[in-house]
Image (cartoon, rainbow, N blue to C red):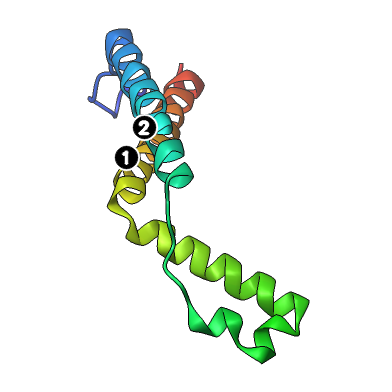
Amino acid sequence: MDAADPTPAPSILRYVLGFLMIGLAWGFTTPFIRAAARTHKPPEHPILQSASVTNSWLKSKIYGAFFGVIDLLRNPKYAIPLVINLTGSIWFFLLIGQAVLIYMQS
C-alpha cells in the first residue's frame, strides 16, 4: 500500500464472500433463464409474414432475431433472472479489478 493512501485493503473474507455471491447470482439464475426461454411462446408478428420479408433470407433472419430478442426481454420470467445474472457479471469484473489493483500495489 502507498503511504499516501490511508484506505486499508479489503480482507480476504470480503473477496471470498464476494465470489460466493457472484456464483449464486450466476448459478441460481441460469435454470430460470433456461426454463423461461424453453417455455416462451412469442406473439405473432405480421411483418414476418409479409412478402418483402419472406422473399429475402437476410431480412427474415434479421427481423426474426430482432423480434426474438425483444419478445424474450419483454417476458419478466426471462428478463428478471437475466438482469440478476448480468449484475453478477458486473460484480465479478469490479471484484477482479480491485483484486488486481491490490496485487499490483503490493
Q: Name the quarter where the N terminus is drawn.
A: top left
Residue 70 placed where, x, y %? 43, 66
- Report the amino acid beneath label 2: Thr
Secondary structure under the numbered disc 2 in the rendered image:
helix
Asked if labels 2 and 1 touch by Cβ distance under 8 angstroms, the answer is: yes
Q: Which residue is mark 1?
A: 84
Q: Nearer the viewer, residue 51 or 17?
A: 51
Rounded to the nearest whole Å, what is the CA distance between mark 1 and mark 2? 7 Å
**Which residue shows up at 54% across the image and 69% down it?**
66
Residue 48 placed where, x, y %? 58, 79
Which is more N-terminal, label 2 or label 1?
2
Residue 94 placed where, x, y %? 39, 35
Direction from residue 94 to residue 52 in the image, left or right: right
Quick one: label 1, few (<14), some, or many (20+) residues within 10 Å? some
- Report the amino acid beneath label 1: Ile
Q: Is residue 87 above or below residue 42?
A: above
**Which residue shows up at 25% across the image and 19% down it?**
8
Q: Which residue is mark 2?
A: 29
